[in-house]
Image (tube, helix red, strand yellow):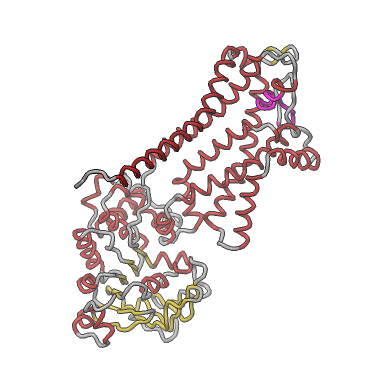
Amino acid sequence: MDSGHNGDFAIETRGLNLWYGDFQALFDVDLGVKRGMITSMIGPSGCGKTTLLRTCNRIIERLGYVRTTGSVFVLGHDIFGDDVELVQVRKQIGMVFQRPNPLPISIRDNVLFGFKLHEARLRKVSAAEEDEVLESSLRQVLLWDTVKDRLDKPATGLSLEEQQKLCIARLLPVKPQVLLMDEPCSALDPAGTEAVEELIWRLRGEYTILIVTHNMAQARRASEECVFMLLGRIIEHGRTEELFLSPEHSETADYIEGRYG
Amino acid sequence: MFTATPLNRRSYRNQSLAKAVFFLMTVVLVIPVLLIVGTLVVKGAPAISWEFLFTAPTDNMTAGGIFPALVGTIWLVVVALLASVPVGVAAALYLSEYAPDNLLTRTINLAIINLAGVPSIVHALFGFGAFVLFFRMGQSILAASLTLAIMTLPVVIVATRESLQAVPQAFREACWNMGATRWQTIRKVVLPNSISGILTGVILEVSRTAGETAPIMFTGAAMFVPFLPESVFDQTMAMSYHLYNVATQLTDVPEELTFGVALVLIAIVLMMNAVSIGFRVYLRGMKKW
Protein backbone atom coordinates (compact mmCIF):
# COMPACT_ATOMS: atom_id res chain seq x y z
CA MET A 1 0.00 0.00 0.00
CA ASP A 2 1.12 3.52 -0.64
CA SER A 3 1.90 5.58 2.39
CA GLY A 4 -0.61 8.11 3.58
CA HIS A 5 -3.39 6.63 1.54
CA ASN A 6 -6.86 6.82 2.96
CA GLY A 7 -8.49 3.39 2.84
CA ASP A 8 -12.00 4.79 2.64
CA PHE A 9 -11.43 6.04 -0.86
CA ALA A 10 -11.81 3.92 -3.96
CA ILE A 11 -10.44 6.72 -6.10
CA GLU A 12 -8.22 9.45 -4.78
CA THR A 13 -6.49 12.10 -6.84
CA ARG A 14 -3.79 14.35 -5.44
CA GLY A 15 -2.67 17.55 -7.06
CA LEU A 16 -3.83 16.31 -10.44
CA ASN A 17 -3.13 18.63 -13.36
CA LEU A 18 -3.85 17.73 -16.94
CA TRP A 19 -3.00 19.42 -20.21
CA TYR A 20 -4.31 18.83 -23.70
CA GLY A 21 -1.28 20.17 -25.55
CA ASP A 22 -0.99 23.71 -24.19
CA PHE A 23 -4.48 23.85 -22.82
CA GLN A 24 -4.76 23.04 -19.14
CA ALA A 25 -8.00 21.16 -18.48
CA LEU A 26 -7.55 20.16 -14.84
CA PHE A 27 -6.07 22.31 -12.08
CA ASP A 28 -4.79 20.77 -8.88
CA VAL A 29 -7.65 18.37 -8.46
CA ASP A 30 -7.90 16.66 -5.08
CA LEU A 31 -10.80 14.28 -5.11
CA GLY A 32 -11.68 11.40 -2.84
CA VAL A 33 -14.40 9.06 -4.03
CA LYS A 34 -15.69 6.94 -1.18
CA ARG A 35 -15.91 3.19 -1.52
CA GLY A 36 -19.25 1.68 -2.31
CA MET A 37 -20.94 4.98 -2.97
CA ILE A 38 -22.38 6.72 -5.97
CA THR A 39 -20.62 9.99 -6.58
CA SER A 40 -21.85 12.26 -9.32
CA MET A 41 -19.92 15.00 -11.06
CA ILE A 42 -21.79 18.02 -12.35
CA GLY A 43 -20.72 21.23 -14.00
CA PRO A 44 -21.13 23.14 -17.22
CA SER A 45 -19.79 21.77 -20.53
CA GLY A 46 -16.03 21.91 -20.75
CA CYS A 47 -15.48 22.05 -17.00
CA GLY A 48 -13.30 18.95 -17.04
CA LYS A 49 -15.61 16.38 -15.51
CA THR A 50 -15.35 13.90 -18.37
CA THR A 51 -11.60 14.51 -18.52
CA LEU A 52 -11.31 13.72 -14.82
CA LEU A 53 -13.44 10.60 -15.24
CA ARG A 54 -11.30 9.41 -18.13
CA THR A 55 -8.12 10.00 -16.20
CA CYS A 56 -9.28 7.54 -13.54
CA ASN A 57 -8.70 4.56 -15.85
CA ARG A 58 -6.04 6.28 -17.97
CA ILE A 59 -8.05 5.99 -21.16
CA ILE A 60 -7.44 9.71 -21.67
CA GLU A 61 -3.86 8.90 -22.61
CA ARG A 62 -5.02 7.47 -25.89
CA LEU A 63 -4.94 11.03 -27.13
CA GLY A 64 -1.21 11.30 -27.57
CA TYR A 65 -0.95 14.98 -26.65
CA VAL A 66 -2.19 14.61 -23.07
CA ARG A 67 0.18 15.30 -20.18
CA THR A 68 -0.54 14.88 -16.49
CA THR A 69 1.14 15.69 -13.20
CA GLY A 70 0.05 14.64 -9.74
CA SER A 71 -1.25 11.21 -8.84
CA VAL A 72 -4.34 9.07 -9.01
CA PHE A 73 -4.81 6.25 -6.54
CA VAL A 74 -7.38 3.61 -7.33
CA LEU A 75 -8.07 1.09 -4.57
CA GLY A 76 -4.92 2.30 -2.86
CA HIS A 77 -2.56 1.91 -5.80
CA ASP A 78 -1.02 4.63 -7.89
CA ILE A 79 -2.27 3.93 -11.41
CA PHE A 80 0.54 6.00 -12.86
CA GLY A 81 3.11 3.80 -11.13
CA ASP A 82 5.91 2.19 -13.13
CA ASP A 83 4.76 -1.41 -12.72
CA VAL A 84 1.14 -0.71 -13.59
CA GLU A 85 -0.35 -2.85 -16.34
CA LEU A 86 -3.12 -0.99 -18.11
CA VAL A 87 -5.02 -4.19 -18.84
CA GLN A 88 -5.30 -4.81 -15.09
CA VAL A 89 -6.36 -1.22 -14.47
CA ARG A 90 -9.14 -1.48 -17.01
CA LYS A 91 -10.24 -4.84 -15.63
CA GLN A 92 -10.70 -3.35 -12.16
CA ILE A 93 -12.33 -0.18 -13.45
CA GLY A 94 -15.28 -0.66 -15.78
CA MET A 95 -16.45 2.14 -17.99
CA VAL A 96 -19.90 2.94 -19.37
CA PHE A 97 -20.23 5.41 -22.21
CA GLN A 98 -22.65 8.07 -23.22
CA ARG A 99 -23.91 6.12 -26.20
CA PRO A 100 -24.48 2.44 -25.51
CA ASN A 101 -21.76 0.61 -27.40
CA PRO A 102 -22.54 -3.10 -27.44
CA LEU A 103 -20.28 -5.05 -29.75
CA PRO A 104 -21.89 -6.32 -32.95
CA ILE A 105 -22.00 -9.88 -31.63
CA SER A 106 -24.59 -11.85 -29.71
CA ILE A 107 -25.88 -10.82 -26.30
CA ARG A 108 -24.16 -13.84 -24.80
CA ASP A 109 -20.80 -13.02 -26.38
CA ASN A 110 -21.08 -9.40 -25.27
CA VAL A 111 -21.57 -10.33 -21.65
CA LEU A 112 -18.85 -12.97 -21.74
CA PHE A 113 -16.39 -10.89 -23.78
CA GLY A 114 -14.33 -9.58 -20.88
CA PHE A 115 -14.73 -12.84 -18.97
CA LYS A 116 -13.29 -14.83 -21.84
CA LEU A 117 -10.51 -12.31 -22.25
CA HIS A 118 -9.41 -12.43 -18.63
CA GLU A 119 -10.63 -15.63 -17.00
CA ALA A 120 -11.06 -18.21 -19.70
CA ARG A 121 -7.47 -17.80 -20.81
CA LEU A 122 -6.08 -18.63 -17.38
CA ARG A 123 -8.08 -21.76 -16.70
CA LYS A 124 -10.57 -24.06 -18.28
CA VAL A 125 -14.05 -22.64 -17.98
CA SER A 126 -16.95 -25.03 -18.41
CA ALA A 127 -19.97 -24.15 -20.47
CA ALA A 128 -22.04 -24.44 -17.29
CA GLU A 129 -19.90 -21.84 -15.56
CA GLU A 130 -20.20 -19.51 -18.52
CA ASP A 131 -23.95 -19.86 -18.43
CA GLU A 132 -23.94 -19.13 -14.73
CA VAL A 133 -21.83 -15.99 -15.17
CA LEU A 134 -24.03 -14.91 -18.03
CA GLU A 135 -27.22 -15.33 -16.06
CA SER A 136 -26.00 -13.68 -12.89
CA SER A 137 -24.62 -10.68 -14.77
CA LEU A 138 -27.82 -10.18 -16.68
CA ARG A 139 -29.88 -10.64 -13.51
CA GLN A 140 -27.84 -7.98 -11.73
CA VAL A 141 -28.75 -5.48 -14.41
CA LEU A 142 -32.40 -6.58 -14.47
CA LEU A 143 -32.13 -7.73 -18.04
CA TRP A 144 -32.29 -11.51 -17.68
CA ASP A 145 -36.05 -11.88 -18.03
CA THR A 146 -36.14 -9.67 -21.10
CA VAL A 147 -33.38 -11.38 -23.03
CA LYS A 148 -33.18 -14.94 -21.73
CA ASP A 149 -34.91 -16.29 -24.83
CA ARG A 150 -32.70 -14.48 -27.30
CA LEU A 151 -29.24 -14.73 -25.86
CA ASP A 152 -27.77 -15.64 -29.22
CA LYS A 153 -29.38 -12.76 -31.08
CA PRO A 154 -27.26 -9.74 -31.93
CA ALA A 155 -26.97 -7.26 -29.10
CA THR A 156 -27.43 -4.39 -31.50
CA GLY A 157 -31.07 -5.40 -31.91
CA LEU A 158 -31.91 -4.38 -28.34
CA SER A 159 -33.47 -1.04 -27.42
CA LEU A 160 -31.07 1.68 -26.29
CA GLU A 161 -32.06 1.18 -22.68
CA GLU A 162 -31.43 -2.55 -22.89
CA GLN A 163 -28.16 -1.92 -24.71
CA GLN A 164 -26.95 0.35 -21.96
CA LYS A 165 -27.89 -2.22 -19.34
CA LEU A 166 -26.03 -4.82 -21.36
CA CYS A 167 -22.99 -2.55 -21.46
CA ILE A 168 -23.08 -2.47 -17.67
CA ALA A 169 -23.68 -6.23 -17.47
CA ARG A 170 -20.64 -7.06 -19.53
CA LEU A 171 -18.38 -5.28 -17.05
CA LEU A 172 -19.54 -7.39 -14.12
CA PRO A 173 -18.14 -10.87 -14.92
CA VAL A 174 -14.55 -9.72 -14.38
CA LYS A 175 -15.55 -8.34 -10.97
CA PRO A 176 -14.48 -4.72 -11.24
CA GLN A 177 -14.60 -2.65 -8.05
CA VAL A 178 -15.12 0.69 -9.67
CA LEU A 179 -17.56 1.69 -12.40
CA LEU A 180 -17.05 4.93 -14.28
CA MET A 181 -20.08 6.24 -16.14
CA ASP A 182 -19.94 9.05 -18.64
CA GLU A 183 -23.46 10.45 -18.94
CA PRO A 184 -24.93 6.95 -19.14
CA CYS A 185 -28.50 8.10 -19.65
CA SER A 186 -28.13 10.99 -22.05
CA ALA A 187 -28.97 8.88 -25.10
CA LEU A 188 -32.04 7.34 -23.47
CA ASP A 189 -35.68 8.39 -23.30
CA PRO A 190 -37.21 9.24 -19.91
CA ALA A 191 -38.41 5.70 -19.26
CA GLY A 192 -34.99 4.29 -20.15
CA THR A 193 -33.30 6.90 -18.00
CA GLU A 194 -35.43 5.94 -15.06
CA ALA A 195 -34.72 2.24 -15.54
CA VAL A 196 -30.96 2.73 -15.83
CA GLU A 197 -30.89 5.11 -12.86
CA GLU A 198 -32.75 2.55 -10.83
CA LEU A 199 -30.19 -0.03 -11.87
CA ILE A 200 -27.27 2.21 -10.92
CA TRP A 201 -28.89 2.79 -7.56
CA ARG A 202 -29.16 -0.97 -7.03
CA LEU A 203 -25.47 -1.46 -7.80
CA ARG A 204 -24.25 0.90 -5.11
CA GLY A 205 -22.58 -0.73 -2.14
CA GLU A 206 -21.23 -3.53 -4.26
CA TYR A 207 -19.43 -1.18 -6.62
CA THR A 208 -18.01 2.27 -6.29
CA ILE A 209 -19.66 4.34 -8.96
CA LEU A 210 -18.45 7.66 -10.32
CA ILE A 211 -20.93 9.17 -12.72
CA VAL A 212 -20.69 12.25 -14.90
CA THR A 213 -23.98 13.89 -15.70
CA HIS A 214 -25.30 16.98 -17.40
CA ASN A 215 -28.56 16.51 -15.70
CA MET A 216 -28.73 18.09 -12.27
CA ALA A 217 -31.98 16.40 -11.42
CA GLN A 218 -30.33 13.08 -12.12
CA ALA A 219 -27.38 13.87 -9.88
CA ARG A 220 -29.83 14.77 -7.18
CA ARG A 221 -31.95 11.65 -7.59
CA ALA A 222 -29.27 9.08 -8.18
CA SER A 223 -26.16 9.93 -6.22
CA GLU A 224 -25.05 10.02 -2.62
CA GLU A 225 -22.21 12.44 -3.02
CA CYS A 226 -21.87 15.17 -5.57
CA VAL A 227 -18.90 17.03 -6.99
CA PHE A 228 -19.32 20.39 -8.66
CA MET A 229 -16.63 21.35 -11.13
CA LEU A 230 -15.98 24.60 -12.91
CA LEU A 231 -13.21 25.48 -15.36
CA GLY A 232 -11.06 22.50 -14.46
CA ARG A 233 -11.28 22.87 -10.68
CA ILE A 234 -13.38 21.18 -8.05
CA ILE A 235 -15.44 23.90 -6.44
CA GLU A 236 -17.44 21.85 -4.05
CA HIS A 237 -17.78 18.25 -2.97
CA GLY A 238 -20.27 17.02 -0.43
CA ARG A 239 -23.31 14.93 0.30
CA THR A 240 -25.71 15.37 -2.58
CA GLU A 241 -28.66 16.73 -0.62
CA GLU A 242 -26.48 19.20 1.23
CA LEU A 243 -24.81 20.40 -1.94
CA PHE A 244 -28.16 21.04 -3.53
CA LEU A 245 -29.92 22.47 -0.51
CA SER A 246 -27.20 24.55 1.06
CA PRO A 247 -24.24 24.98 -1.26
CA GLU A 248 -21.23 26.61 0.32
CA HIS A 249 -19.98 28.47 -2.70
CA SER A 250 -21.81 31.08 -4.70
CA GLU A 251 -20.68 29.48 -8.01
CA THR A 252 -22.33 26.22 -6.98
CA ALA A 253 -25.49 28.00 -5.95
CA ASP A 254 -25.64 29.93 -9.21
CA TYR A 255 -25.11 26.78 -11.26
CA ILE A 256 -27.69 24.63 -9.54
CA GLU A 257 -30.18 27.44 -9.78
CA GLY A 258 -29.59 27.54 -13.48
CA ARG A 259 -28.04 31.00 -13.72
CA TYR A 260 -25.37 29.68 -16.09
CA GLY A 261 -24.21 26.39 -17.67
CA MET B 1 -51.26 34.62 -53.71
CA PHE B 2 -49.49 31.37 -54.27
CA THR B 3 -49.02 31.74 -58.04
CA ALA B 4 -45.59 31.69 -59.63
CA THR B 5 -43.78 34.97 -60.03
CA PRO B 6 -41.43 35.57 -63.01
CA LEU B 7 -38.53 35.06 -60.61
CA ASN B 8 -39.89 31.63 -59.65
CA ARG B 9 -40.21 30.68 -63.28
CA ARG B 10 -36.66 31.73 -64.04
CA SER B 11 -35.32 29.74 -61.10
CA TYR B 12 -37.30 26.78 -62.28
CA ARG B 13 -35.91 27.08 -65.82
CA ASN B 14 -32.34 27.20 -64.52
CA GLN B 15 -32.96 24.23 -62.34
CA SER B 16 -34.30 22.20 -65.28
CA LEU B 17 -31.35 23.22 -67.37
CA ALA B 18 -28.86 22.14 -64.72
CA LYS B 19 -30.60 18.80 -64.36
CA ALA B 20 -30.54 18.26 -68.13
CA VAL B 21 -26.81 19.05 -68.36
CA PHE B 22 -25.92 16.66 -65.56
CA PHE B 23 -28.05 13.92 -67.08
CA LEU B 24 -26.36 14.42 -70.43
CA MET B 25 -22.92 14.07 -68.83
CA THR B 26 -24.02 10.84 -67.21
CA VAL B 27 -25.12 9.53 -70.57
CA VAL B 28 -21.80 10.56 -72.12
CA LEU B 29 -20.12 8.51 -69.44
CA VAL B 30 -22.13 5.40 -70.15
CA ILE B 31 -21.93 5.49 -73.94
CA PRO B 32 -18.26 4.43 -74.29
CA VAL B 33 -18.82 1.51 -71.93
CA LEU B 34 -21.79 0.32 -73.95
CA LEU B 35 -19.94 0.80 -77.22
CA ILE B 36 -16.88 -1.12 -76.06
CA VAL B 37 -18.80 -4.01 -74.62
CA GLY B 38 -21.20 -4.01 -77.58
CA THR B 39 -18.44 -4.05 -80.19
CA LEU B 40 -16.56 -6.78 -78.38
CA VAL B 41 -19.62 -8.96 -78.08
CA VAL B 42 -20.71 -8.49 -81.68
CA LYS B 43 -17.27 -9.01 -83.19
CA GLY B 44 -15.80 -11.40 -80.66
CA ALA B 45 -18.68 -13.69 -79.79
CA PRO B 46 -18.43 -15.82 -82.97
CA ALA B 47 -14.89 -16.79 -81.96
CA ILE B 48 -15.86 -18.03 -78.51
CA SER B 49 -16.22 -21.78 -78.16
CA TRP B 50 -15.04 -24.48 -75.78
CA GLU B 51 -12.29 -25.17 -78.22
CA PHE B 52 -11.24 -21.52 -78.23
CA LEU B 53 -11.04 -21.46 -74.47
CA PHE B 54 -9.35 -24.79 -73.95
CA THR B 55 -6.79 -25.25 -76.74
CA ALA B 56 -3.46 -23.63 -77.50
CA PRO B 57 -2.93 -21.21 -80.38
CA THR B 58 -1.89 -22.75 -83.67
CA ASP B 59 -0.58 -21.58 -87.08
CA ASN B 60 1.64 -18.80 -85.72
CA MET B 61 -1.17 -17.74 -83.37
CA THR B 62 -3.49 -16.94 -86.25
CA ALA B 63 -5.82 -19.77 -85.27
CA GLY B 64 -6.60 -22.05 -82.34
CA GLY B 65 -7.40 -21.05 -78.80
CA ILE B 66 -6.12 -19.17 -75.81
CA PHE B 67 -5.77 -21.84 -73.14
CA PRO B 68 -2.11 -21.19 -72.19
CA ALA B 69 -2.79 -17.47 -71.88
CA LEU B 70 -5.85 -18.08 -69.72
CA VAL B 71 -3.94 -20.42 -67.41
CA GLY B 72 -0.98 -18.02 -67.37
CA THR B 73 -3.17 -15.12 -66.26
CA ILE B 74 -4.55 -17.23 -63.42
CA TRP B 75 -1.00 -18.08 -62.31
CA LEU B 76 0.06 -14.45 -62.42
CA VAL B 77 -2.96 -13.26 -60.47
CA VAL B 78 -2.75 -15.95 -57.79
CA VAL B 79 0.97 -15.47 -57.15
CA ALA B 80 0.55 -11.67 -57.13
CA LEU B 81 -2.25 -12.03 -54.57
CA LEU B 82 -0.19 -14.30 -52.37
CA ALA B 83 2.51 -11.66 -52.33
CA SER B 84 0.46 -8.49 -52.00
CA VAL B 85 -2.48 -9.38 -49.76
CA PRO B 86 -0.55 -10.35 -46.61
CA VAL B 87 1.77 -7.38 -46.95
CA GLY B 88 -1.00 -4.95 -47.83
CA VAL B 89 -3.42 -6.04 -45.11
CA ALA B 90 -0.69 -6.06 -42.47
CA ALA B 91 0.49 -2.61 -43.51
CA ALA B 92 -3.06 -1.28 -43.45
CA LEU B 93 -3.63 -2.79 -40.00
CA TYR B 94 -0.52 -1.09 -38.73
CA LEU B 95 -1.39 2.26 -40.27
CA SER B 96 -4.99 2.20 -39.15
CA GLU B 97 -4.80 0.54 -35.74
CA TYR B 98 -1.35 1.12 -34.34
CA ALA B 99 0.49 3.97 -36.02
CA PRO B 100 0.67 7.22 -34.09
CA ASP B 101 -0.11 10.32 -36.10
CA ASN B 102 3.42 11.58 -36.64
CA LEU B 103 5.76 12.59 -39.42
CA LEU B 104 6.78 9.01 -40.21
CA THR B 105 3.19 7.85 -40.58
CA ARG B 106 2.31 10.80 -42.77
CA THR B 107 5.37 10.13 -44.91
CA ILE B 108 4.35 6.51 -45.33
CA ASN B 109 0.84 7.56 -46.31
CA LEU B 110 2.25 9.94 -48.86
CA ALA B 111 4.47 7.19 -50.23
CA ILE B 112 1.47 4.90 -50.65
CA ILE B 113 -0.44 7.54 -52.57
CA ASN B 114 2.58 8.14 -54.77
CA LEU B 115 3.06 4.44 -55.34
CA ALA B 116 -0.52 4.34 -56.62
CA GLY B 117 0.32 7.11 -59.06
CA VAL B 118 3.41 5.52 -60.59
CA PRO B 119 2.72 4.62 -64.24
CA SER B 120 2.62 0.89 -64.85
CA ILE B 121 5.46 1.02 -67.39
CA VAL B 122 7.70 2.41 -64.66
CA HIS B 123 6.70 -0.47 -62.44
CA ALA B 124 7.62 -2.72 -65.34
CA LEU B 125 11.10 -1.29 -65.59
CA PHE B 126 11.54 -1.47 -61.84
CA GLY B 127 10.41 -5.10 -61.85
CA PHE B 128 12.78 -5.90 -64.68
CA GLY B 129 15.72 -4.30 -62.91
CA ALA B 130 14.94 -5.56 -59.43
CA PHE B 131 13.40 -8.99 -59.82
CA VAL B 132 14.56 -10.20 -63.23
CA LEU B 133 18.14 -8.93 -63.08
CA PHE B 134 19.15 -8.11 -59.53
CA PHE B 135 17.42 -10.99 -57.76
CA ARG B 136 18.19 -13.24 -60.73
CA MET B 137 14.65 -14.53 -61.06
CA GLY B 138 14.90 -14.25 -64.81
CA GLN B 139 11.79 -13.68 -66.83
CA SER B 140 9.37 -15.75 -64.84
CA ILE B 141 5.90 -15.85 -63.33
CA LEU B 142 7.51 -14.98 -60.00
CA ALA B 143 9.15 -11.82 -61.30
CA ALA B 144 6.03 -10.75 -63.18
CA SER B 145 3.74 -11.45 -60.24
CA LEU B 146 5.92 -9.57 -57.78
CA THR B 147 5.93 -6.60 -60.13
CA LEU B 148 2.13 -6.76 -60.31
CA ALA B 149 1.98 -7.13 -56.55
CA ILE B 150 3.98 -3.96 -55.97
CA MET B 151 1.82 -2.13 -58.45
CA THR B 152 -1.42 -3.18 -56.76
CA LEU B 153 -0.21 -2.90 -53.18
CA PRO B 154 -1.57 0.64 -52.74
CA VAL B 155 -5.02 -0.54 -53.82
CA VAL B 156 -5.01 -3.26 -51.18
CA ILE B 157 -3.67 -0.94 -48.49
CA VAL B 158 -6.10 1.85 -49.21
CA ALA B 159 -9.14 -0.44 -49.52
CA THR B 160 -8.21 -2.29 -46.34
CA ARG B 161 -7.53 0.86 -44.39
CA GLU B 162 -10.81 2.36 -45.47
CA SER B 163 -12.79 -0.66 -44.42
CA LEU B 164 -10.93 -0.79 -41.09
CA GLN B 165 -11.74 2.82 -40.47
CA ALA B 166 -15.38 2.20 -41.28
CA VAL B 167 -15.60 0.09 -38.12
CA PRO B 168 -17.10 2.43 -35.51
CA GLN B 169 -14.60 3.70 -32.98
CA ALA B 170 -17.11 2.88 -30.24
CA PHE B 171 -16.46 -0.83 -30.77
CA ARG B 172 -12.77 -0.36 -30.20
CA GLU B 173 -13.40 1.79 -27.14
CA ALA B 174 -15.69 -0.87 -25.74
CA CYS B 175 -13.03 -3.53 -26.19
CA TRP B 176 -10.15 -1.51 -24.85
CA ASN B 177 -12.11 -0.58 -21.80
CA MET B 178 -12.70 -4.18 -20.98
CA GLY B 179 -8.95 -4.60 -20.95
CA ALA B 180 -8.51 -6.04 -24.43
CA THR B 181 -5.17 -5.37 -26.09
CA ARG B 182 -5.07 -3.80 -29.51
CA TRP B 183 -4.43 -7.15 -31.13
CA GLN B 184 -7.33 -8.82 -29.29
CA THR B 185 -9.52 -5.93 -30.38
CA ILE B 186 -8.43 -6.30 -33.97
CA ARG B 187 -8.94 -10.05 -34.01
CA LYS B 188 -12.30 -10.17 -32.28
CA VAL B 189 -13.99 -7.00 -33.41
CA VAL B 190 -12.22 -4.98 -36.08
CA LEU B 191 -11.37 -7.71 -38.59
CA PRO B 192 -14.69 -9.58 -38.45
CA ASN B 193 -16.45 -6.31 -39.17
CA SER B 194 -14.21 -5.13 -41.96
CA ILE B 195 -13.56 -8.37 -43.79
CA SER B 196 -16.16 -7.60 -46.47
CA GLY B 197 -14.43 -4.37 -47.42
CA ILE B 198 -11.04 -6.03 -47.41
CA LEU B 199 -12.26 -8.82 -49.69
CA THR B 200 -13.76 -6.26 -52.01
CA GLY B 201 -10.42 -4.53 -52.25
CA VAL B 202 -8.70 -7.81 -52.93
CA ILE B 203 -11.07 -8.74 -55.70
CA LEU B 204 -10.75 -5.32 -57.29
CA GLU B 205 -7.04 -5.87 -57.20
CA VAL B 206 -7.50 -9.19 -58.98
CA SER B 207 -9.43 -7.55 -61.77
CA ARG B 208 -6.78 -4.92 -62.20
CA THR B 209 -3.95 -7.45 -62.07
CA ALA B 210 -5.61 -9.59 -64.71
CA GLY B 211 -5.82 -6.72 -67.15
CA GLU B 212 -2.37 -5.16 -66.81
CA THR B 213 0.04 -5.59 -69.70
CA ALA B 214 3.02 -3.32 -69.26
CA PRO B 215 4.33 -4.72 -65.95
CA ILE B 216 4.48 -8.27 -67.25
CA MET B 217 5.90 -7.54 -70.72
CA PHE B 218 9.54 -7.43 -69.61
CA THR B 219 9.26 -9.52 -66.51
CA GLY B 220 7.67 -12.83 -67.38
CA ALA B 221 5.11 -12.82 -70.16
CA ALA B 222 6.05 -14.58 -73.37
CA MET B 223 4.56 -14.20 -76.79
CA PHE B 224 4.21 -17.91 -77.29
CA VAL B 225 4.84 -20.83 -74.98
CA PRO B 226 3.53 -24.11 -76.29
CA PHE B 227 3.18 -25.70 -72.85
CA LEU B 228 1.49 -24.68 -69.62
CA PRO B 229 3.64 -23.28 -66.80
CA GLU B 230 4.68 -25.84 -64.23
CA SER B 231 6.25 -23.61 -61.60
CA VAL B 232 6.65 -19.95 -60.77
CA PHE B 233 10.05 -19.98 -62.46
CA ASP B 234 8.57 -20.61 -65.91
CA GLN B 235 7.70 -17.96 -68.41
CA THR B 236 4.10 -17.88 -69.37
CA MET B 237 1.60 -16.47 -71.81
CA ALA B 238 -0.99 -14.07 -70.40
CA MET B 239 -4.32 -12.81 -71.70
CA SER B 240 -3.47 -9.14 -71.74
CA TYR B 241 -0.11 -9.61 -73.42
CA HIS B 242 -1.61 -12.10 -75.85
CA LEU B 243 -4.18 -9.52 -76.87
CA TYR B 244 -1.44 -6.97 -77.43
CA ASN B 245 0.39 -9.45 -79.64
CA VAL B 246 -2.50 -10.64 -81.77
CA ALA B 247 -3.73 -7.09 -82.18
CA THR B 248 -0.50 -5.31 -83.01
CA GLN B 249 2.52 -7.59 -83.38
CA LEU B 250 1.30 -10.35 -85.68
CA THR B 251 -0.06 -10.19 -89.16
CA ASP B 252 -2.83 -12.25 -90.66
CA VAL B 253 -4.68 -12.71 -87.39
CA PRO B 254 -8.40 -12.93 -88.13
CA GLU B 255 -10.27 -10.00 -86.63
CA GLU B 256 -12.72 -12.22 -84.84
CA LEU B 257 -9.91 -13.97 -82.96
CA THR B 258 -8.54 -10.66 -81.69
CA PHE B 259 -11.95 -9.56 -80.54
CA GLY B 260 -12.52 -12.96 -79.00
CA VAL B 261 -9.41 -12.58 -76.84
CA ALA B 262 -10.49 -9.09 -75.82
CA LEU B 263 -13.97 -10.33 -75.00
CA VAL B 264 -12.68 -13.11 -72.76
CA LEU B 265 -10.33 -10.69 -71.00
CA ILE B 266 -13.01 -8.13 -70.31
CA ALA B 267 -15.41 -10.91 -69.27
CA ILE B 268 -12.89 -12.08 -66.67
CA VAL B 269 -12.50 -8.57 -65.31
CA LEU B 270 -16.24 -7.88 -65.26
CA MET B 271 -16.93 -11.20 -63.61
CA MET B 272 -14.39 -10.43 -60.92
CA ASN B 273 -16.01 -7.08 -60.31
CA ALA B 274 -19.45 -8.67 -60.19
CA VAL B 275 -18.22 -11.21 -57.64
CA SER B 276 -16.73 -8.36 -55.64
CA ILE B 277 -20.00 -6.46 -55.62
CA GLY B 278 -21.93 -9.61 -54.80
CA PHE B 279 -19.61 -10.32 -51.91
CA ARG B 280 -20.03 -6.86 -50.56
CA VAL B 281 -23.80 -6.99 -50.74
CA TYR B 282 -23.86 -10.42 -49.10
CA LEU B 283 -21.48 -9.52 -46.28
CA ARG B 284 -23.15 -6.20 -45.67
CA GLY B 285 -26.39 -8.07 -45.22
CA MET B 286 -24.73 -10.16 -42.52
CA LYS B 287 -23.35 -7.12 -40.74
CA LYS B 288 -25.16 -6.49 -37.53
CA TRP B 289 -24.99 -2.80 -37.02
Q: Is residue A187 above or below residue B197?
A: below
Residue ID at (36%, 64%)? A95
Could you tell me residue B44's position as x and y percent?
A: 59, 16
Residue A36 figure quarter:
bottom left
Which is nearer the eye, A163 or A215?
Answer: A215
Q: Which residues are magenta?
A: B232-244
Could you tell me residue B168's position as x and y percent?
A: 42, 53
Residue ID at (21%, 80%)? A244
Q: Is residue A112 above or below residue A29?
A: above
Query: Viewed as shown, does residue B283 lie left or right of A152?
Result: right
Which is nearer the eye, A38 or B96?
Answer: B96
Query: Viewed as shown, does residue B274 lie left or right of A256?
Result: right
Residue ID at (25%, 49%)? A147
Query: Viewed as shown, does residue A25 lie left or right of A230?
Result: right
Residue B61 figure quarter:
top right
Could you tell me residue A32's position as x and y percent?
A: 35, 81
Per the image, is A44 magenta?
no
**Quadrant holding the N terminus of chain A:** bottom left
**Quadrant holding the C terminus of chain A:** bottom left
Could you tell me residue B98's position as x and y percent?
A: 54, 58
Per the image, is B236 magenta?
yes
**Numbered-mark total:** 0
